Image (cartoon, rainbow, N blue to C red):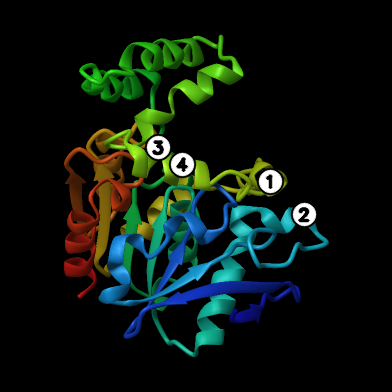
């Protein structure tokens, strides 16, 4: 597996799928390896996917300094990868929590980013909040599903501060557009692929400066795609739409009947949208 060195000497690994112009892909979690991204539903037929395993996950080494898991410090790892690949500019795709890293990288190195695709993005880096009512509103769209009653009760328990371990398991179906065998297999395959210690440090106090990041992104004039899942409980479309408004040249797309993993819910639809944007 190809690898490169971070500025602190940590060896970081990445997976390569497909051929053509590279697209650097940052996984979410936070601090989960890239396995769950697969080939993004077949996007590798259009671009060469460079799937990064963040430090301390997958095939990447564990650093001695655990504060290096902070999102703001991971920016240097992305820049080291760009230099390793010999690219003057990179196209960047990020999912979920990886969007926080992509936002910080873009804010710090705006001239190094050609196109930016944020897929069901976490909005912490830009200071947007997802309210409990917004999540409940999206959840209610699934009321005809056979699993809805138990899942919605569990979600209300979580929102009310009365969650149990079973509550978190019960809401799993909300994160996919269809809770079918493919979704269940994708969910099960993620077990053990996240570094929990790293995840705790990723968004530590002082990591984000939303005002500064928003100001930098307001001056970022390259094309941006923000893709939301219509029934994504994690980042509802209303929040992604607000996020899109922070950029001067953003395309906001809602994928119908998609949850937090739109390439799993409808690979053809996801690939058509992202490939058209990326060119």
Q: Is residue 251 left or right of residue 57?
A: left
Q: Tag 4 or tag 2, which sits nearer the N-term?
A: 2
Q: Name the residue under label 2.
A: 66
Q: In this view, does 208 lie to the left or right of 26?
A: right
Q: Where is residue 116 in the image (x, y as percent from the top left)?
A: 33, 65
User: Is disc 3 surrounded by few (<14), some (14 to 19) or many (20+) residues within 10 Å?
Assistant: some
Q: Mark 1 points at which residue?
A: 201
Numbered tag placed on residue 187 in the rendering: 4
At a point 68% along the width and 49% down the height, the residue shown is 198
- Image height check: is 8 above or below 173? below
Marks 1 & 2, CB-CB < 8 Å contact: yes
Q: Tell me the SS state at disc 2.
A: helix
Q: Label 4 to label 1, Cα distance in Å?
A: 24 Å
Q: Mark 3 points at which residue?
A: 128
Q: Label 3 to label 4, Cα distance in Å?
A: 26 Å
- Image height check: is 268 above or below 108? above
Q: Label 2 to label 4, Cα distance in Å?
A: 27 Å
Q: Tag 4 or tag 3, which sits nearer the N-term?
A: 3
Q: In which quarter of the image is residue 235?
A: top left
Q: Tell me the SS state at disc 1.
A: helix
**Which is in the foreground here, disc 4 or disc 1?**
4
Q: Where is residue 164 in the image (x, y as percent from the top left)?
A: 59, 15
**Which is in the foreground here, disc 1 or disc 3?**
1
**Which is in the foreground here, disc 3 or disc 4?**
4
Q: In this view, does 196 lie to the left or right of 264?
A: right
User: Is disc 4 surrounded by few (<14), some (14 to 19) or many (20+) residues within 10 Å?
Assistant: some
User: Is disc 2 surrounded by few (<14), some (14 to 19) or many (20+) residues within 10 Å?
Assistant: some
- Image height check: is 96 above or below 273? above
Q: Tell me the SS state at disc 3.
A: loop
At a point 35% along the width and 46% down the height, the residue shown is 261
Quadrant the C terminus occupies: bottom left
């Amino acid at each position: 597996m190809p690898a490169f060195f971070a500025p602190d000497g940590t060896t970081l690994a990445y997976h390569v799928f497909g051929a053509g112009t590279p697209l650097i892909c940052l996984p979410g979690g936070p601090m989960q390896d890239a396995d769950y991204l697969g080939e993004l539903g077949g996007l590798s037929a259009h671009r060469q996917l460079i799937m990064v395993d963040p430090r301390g996950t997958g095939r990447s080494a564990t650093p001695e300094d655990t504060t290096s898991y902070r999102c703001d410090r991971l920016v240097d790892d992305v820049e080291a990868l760009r230099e390793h690949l010999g690219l003057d500019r990179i196209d960047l795709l990020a999912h979920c929590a990886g969007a926080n890293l992509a936002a910080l990288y873009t804010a710090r190195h705006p001239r190094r980013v050609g196109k930016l695709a944020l897929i069901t993005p976490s909005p912490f880096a830009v200071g947007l909040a997802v309210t409990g009512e917004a999540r409940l509103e999206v959840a209610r769209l699934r009321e005809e599903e056979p699993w809805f009653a138990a899942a919605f009760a569990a979600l209300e328990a979580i929102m009310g501060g009365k969650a149990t371990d079973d509550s978190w398991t019960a809401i799993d179906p909300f994160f996919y557009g269809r809770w079918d065998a493919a979704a269940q297999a994708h969910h099960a395959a993620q077990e053990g692929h996240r570094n929990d210690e790293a995840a705790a440090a990723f968004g530590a106090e002082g990591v984000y400066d939303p005002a500064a990041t928003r100001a930098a992104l307001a001056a970022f004039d390259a094309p941006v795609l923000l893709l939301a899942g219509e029934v994504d409980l994690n980042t509802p479309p209303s929040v992604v739409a607000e996020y899109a408004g922070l950029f001067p040249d953003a395309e906001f797309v809602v994928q119908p009947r998609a949850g937090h993993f739109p390439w799993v819910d409808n690979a053809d639809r996801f690939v058509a949208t992202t490939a058209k944007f990326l060119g």
